[in-house]
Amino acid sequence: MGIIAYIILGALAGWIASMLAGTNAQMGLLANIIVGIIGAFLGGLLFSMFGGDGVTGFNLWSLIVAVVGAFILLMLLKTFHHGVGNHA
């Protein structure tokens, strides 16, 4: 899969995950792409740990894997970000 395909898949996955996580208003296109690409790697790692296929190309399965990974990443970031500074 080429770099353009990774960027498109990352943008879609990041946008869908940000909508599901409720962070879409704070994120722009670049943030969605970054979260989606990192989410694709994270999702691929998690799915392969449980015996499934990770990102297999530019297809629906890879989008699902990337969205799951991006959602997990956003929830972790959201939890960490809200936990920081609330101790006052």
Image: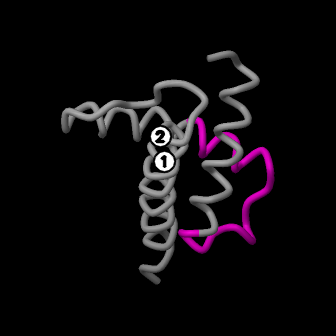
Closest to the observer: 13 or 88?
Answer: 13
As helix, strand or loop, the secondary structure at mark 1 comes to helix
The question of residue 36 being in magenta is answered with: yes
Is 73 left, or right, of 11 in this rendering? left
Quadrant of the rendered image containing residue 25: bottom right
What amino acid is at disc 2? Answer: Trp
Q: CA distance from mark 1 to mark 2?
A: 5 Å
Numbered tag placed on residue 64 in the rendering: 1
> Seen from this angle, which residue lies furthest left?
50
Q: Position of residue 34 (x, y in %)?
A: 65, 40
What is the span of residues highlighted in magenta in the rendered image? Answer: 20-37
Q: Quadrant of the N terminus?
A: top right
Is 2 left, or right, of 68 in this rendering? right
As helix, strand or loop, the secondary structure at mark 2 comes to helix
Q: Position of residue 5 (x, y in %)?
A: 70, 26
For the point 44% across and 43% down, which residue is it?
A: 65
- Are the residues at dot 1 and dot 2 in contact (C-beta closer than 8 Å)? yes
Q: Main secondary structure of the magenta part?
A: helix
Numbered tag placed on residue 61 in the rendering: 2
- Total numbered labels placed on residues in the image: 2
Q: Is residue 69 above or below residue 55?
A: below
The question of residue 84 being in magenta is answered with: no
Numbered tag placed on residue 55 in the rendering: none
